[in-house]
Image: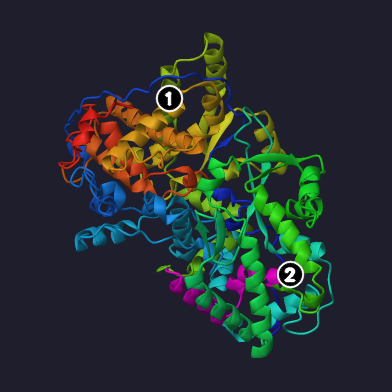
């Protein structure tokens, strides 16, 4: 195919950022049998462990390269023991600390998508340059997915030894993706060709009046594009035990929106409409549209987007109204939102999985879905707009954003300018990330083998086993409703076999099906253990403080529905930790404005318990093998907790439910426990003395 006749081909599966399916290397730990059983309330106890100094043996010293990597990693965040009053305020997710900043709609993860942009945090007057420098430095700490992407990038760009044919093909594919010469020479032609395949478009030529639902299904199935709503797959939190994955449906918008707490409605952000309008006009100009035609279509696109935005509500509001996880059959959904052919669209999106109208879905915002349906019906039937096809234009704009990485740089530059205008300093994600993801889709087994070669299997297995042992100890601390409940859950937990999962163990799809249908293994994929989050040459304190915590958190999420339904422990600990936070940040007693939802209490308990489990596992590791290296003479516990403070950027499906930065848990776990080597008391926070132990 010549460069000028380059075409955009349908993707074999939706983009992972769109929420449908993550690449295998990014999967969380997978239970081949889901542990479930009732739990009961108890007051979790803080580990009462005295700090022990261990003498390092001559053979325990680190090499200079290892020391350099570990020191660089450690220097990326504020030391909680030298900045006790505000270290937890400076991190990648610190925008969540301001209740006035609002809750943003989930974005699509595609270039230039307005819903990806975080709100800015307005800090108190008098913030010093030192604080701002620390904040900027800590924003460079990467989440798990970005760490793995960078690690895979290093592998794909390395050329230090002869490679197999498969590896050579993977690297060739990656480098061809980076080569944008053919893309630049093709200009907008590939996208215009794609539009013709979809029946045309009145903006660039003739439109064949294609059926709305047929076009929508095609976009979802072949191009990973979801113009009106987003789809995710996950477990129903109200179901305990093993169950099939449920399909989640939630709002999805391109236009930047803001929440009006007085009217309890969303609206287009006035201050961002001008740059958003300019970007839409620029896109159409790049596609060859005349200015007079462009203005009409952009106007109707923004008008339709604004109508859809009215019912798009923030997470906190939906939590308070019980609008998350609303369960209904596809048939019931069809009756409430008839404009969409739900069965046809879901069958297209989840092909080849069989779906019927009796299958269940979970709605994250039913009022939005209902309003979306009525809005689409009204716009489709407006006689004066039938020739301009505004609903079709709306879908084409969404497709354009999905295909942006495959178009010339003029499109991505326009998206970048919009990102900057909306306050996103980082702008559009670099092209290498898109290329790594595309390479992983086509060569996942090849990359898995390359990861396996670089993975320190023995050290990883040791951490997994120690964390799982500490996890079982944590379960025994709970007070159960009765002995039978305790025995049921412990029997299932004891039947599980946690271990590192290497993809080359499975040679066929049948073996994979057998593993997940009959096995009792709790599998942790190699992609979790990429540098710099894990390095076998780091002090063990650093690996347990970061990776140990993440492993424990993932395990706890798997059993959370069973624990929460049978005990008050989750609620009690969540409230206790939150009381610490309100006191330290001086927000306590403000008319209940800062109370937590049930989902937020659950996430606080999970992360607090995960920290306890990881610390207990590390201390047990020290008992079994007292020697561990250190950095700058820091004690083992201090090194562990300082490393843990860097987990703030971790992005997982539950992050939106965490109302505070995980690093604040250091303050809670150190309160009155005698655990920490130095005090984390703030001179100006006298109320801390009255806080209870969680």
The residue positioned 62% from the left and 32% from the top of the image is: 238
Mostly what secondary structure, the magenta segment? helix
The residue positioned 52% from the left and 20% from the top of the image is: 39
Image quarter (top left, top right, bottom left or bottom right) of the C terminus = top left
Q: What percent of the width, then of the height, locates residue 86?
A: 25, 48
Q: Residue furthest top?
A: 483
Disc assigned to residue 672? none
Q: Is residue 40 above or below residue 213?
A: above
Q: Is residue 503 above or below residue 490?
A: below
Specify few, some or many for label 1: CA neighbours under 10 Å numbering under 14, 14-19, or 20 or more.
Answer: some
- Nearer to the camera, 114 or 562: 114
Please give the residue where the numbered disc 2 appears in the rendered image. Answer: 391
Q: Is residue 287 visible?
A: no
Q: Is residue 300 visible?
A: yes
Stretch of the chain drawn in magenta: 394-423
The colour scheme used here is: rainbow
- Nearer to the camera, 239 or 457: 239
Q: What percent of the width, then of the height, locates residue 625?
A: 28, 28
Please give the residue where the numbered disc 1 appears in the rendered image. Answer: 469
Q: Is residue 287 left or right of residue 680?
A: right
């Amino acid at each position: 195919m010549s460069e000028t006749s380059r075409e955009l081909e349908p993707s074999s599966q939706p983009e992972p950022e769109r929420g449908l399916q993550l690449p295998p290397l990014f999967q969380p730990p997978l239970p081949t049998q889901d542990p479930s059983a009732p739990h009961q309330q108890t007051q979790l106890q803080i580990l009462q462990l005295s700090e022990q100094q261990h003498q390092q043996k001559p053979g325990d010293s680190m090499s200079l390269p290892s020391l350099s990597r570990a020191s660089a990693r450690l220097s990326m965040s504020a030391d909680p023991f030298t900045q006790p009053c505000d270290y937890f305020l400076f991190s990648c997710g610190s925008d969540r600390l301001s209740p006035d900043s609002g809750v943003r709609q989930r974005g699509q993860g595609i270039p230039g998508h307005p819903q990806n942009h975080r709100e800015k945090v307005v800090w108190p007057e008098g913030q010093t340059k030192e604080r701002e420098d620390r904040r900027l430095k800590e924003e460079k700490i990467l989440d798990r997915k970005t760490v793995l992407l960078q690690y895979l990038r290093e592998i794909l760009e390395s050329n230090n030894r002869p490679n197999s044919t498969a590896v050579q093909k993977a690297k060739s594919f990656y480098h061809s993706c980076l080569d944008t010469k053919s893309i630049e020479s093709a200009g907008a032609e590939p996208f215009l060709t794609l539009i013709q395949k979809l029946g045309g478009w009145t903006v660039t030529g003739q439109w064949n009046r294609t059926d709305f639902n047929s076009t929508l299904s095609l976009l979802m199935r072949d191009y990973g594009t979801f113009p009106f709503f987003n789809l995710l797959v996950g477990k129903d939190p109200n179901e305990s035990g093993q169950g099939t994955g449920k399909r989640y449906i939630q709002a999805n918008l391109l236009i930047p929106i803001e929440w009006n707490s007085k009217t309890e409605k969303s609206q287009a952000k006035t201050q961002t409409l001008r740059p958003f309008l300019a970007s839409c006009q620029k896109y159409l100009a790049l596609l060859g549209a005349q200015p007079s035609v462009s203005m009409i279509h952009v106007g109707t696109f923004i008008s339709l987007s604004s109508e859809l935005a009215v019912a798009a509500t923030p997470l906190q509001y939906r939590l308070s109204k019980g609008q998350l996880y609303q369960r209904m059959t596809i048939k019931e959904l069809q009756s409430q939102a008839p404009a969409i052919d739900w069965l046809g669209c879901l069958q297209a999106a989840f092909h080849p999985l069989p779906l019927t109208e009796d299958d269940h879905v979970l709605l994250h915002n039913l009022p939005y879905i209902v309003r979306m349906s009525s809005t689409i019906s009204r716009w489709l039937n407006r006689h004066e707009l039938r020739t301009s096809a505004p609903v079709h234009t709306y879908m084409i704009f969404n497709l354009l954003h999905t295909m942006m990485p495959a178009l010339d740089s003029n499109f991505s530059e326009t998206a970048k300018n919009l990102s900057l205008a909306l306050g996103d300093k980082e702008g559009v994600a670099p092209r290498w990330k898109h290329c790594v993801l595309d390479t992983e889709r086509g060569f996942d087994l090849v990359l898995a083998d390359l990861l396996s070669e670089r993975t320190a299997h023995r050290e990883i297995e040791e951490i997994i086993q120690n964390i799982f042992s500490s996890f079982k100890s944590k379960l025994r601390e709970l007070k159960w409703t009765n002995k039978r409940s305790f025995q049921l859950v412990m029997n299932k937990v004891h039947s599980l076999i946690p271990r590192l999962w290497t993809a080359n163990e499975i040679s066929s799809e049948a073996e994979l099906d057998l593993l997940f249908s009959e096995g009792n293994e709790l599998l942790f994929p190699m992609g979790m253990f990429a540098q710099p989050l894990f390095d076998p040459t780091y002090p063990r304190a650093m690996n347990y403080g970061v990776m140990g915590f993440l492993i424990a958190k993932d395990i706890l999420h798997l059993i959370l529905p069973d624990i929460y339904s049978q005990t008050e422990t989750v609620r009690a600990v969540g409230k206790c930790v939150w009381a610490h936070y309100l006191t330290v940040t001086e927000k306590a007693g403000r008319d209940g404005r800062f109370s937590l939802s049930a989902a937020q209490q659950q996430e606080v308990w999970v992360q607090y318990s995960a920290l306890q489990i990881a610390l207990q596992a590390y201390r047990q590791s020290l008992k079994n093998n007292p020697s561990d290296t250190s950095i700058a003479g820091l004690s083992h516990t201090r090194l562990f907790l300082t490393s843990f403070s860097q987990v703030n950027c971790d992005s997982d499906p539950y992050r939106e439910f965490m109302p505070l930065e995980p690093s604040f848990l250091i303050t809670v776990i150190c309160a009155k426990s005698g655990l920490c080597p130095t005090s984390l008391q703030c001179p100006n926070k006298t109320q801390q003395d009255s806080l209870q132990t969680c």
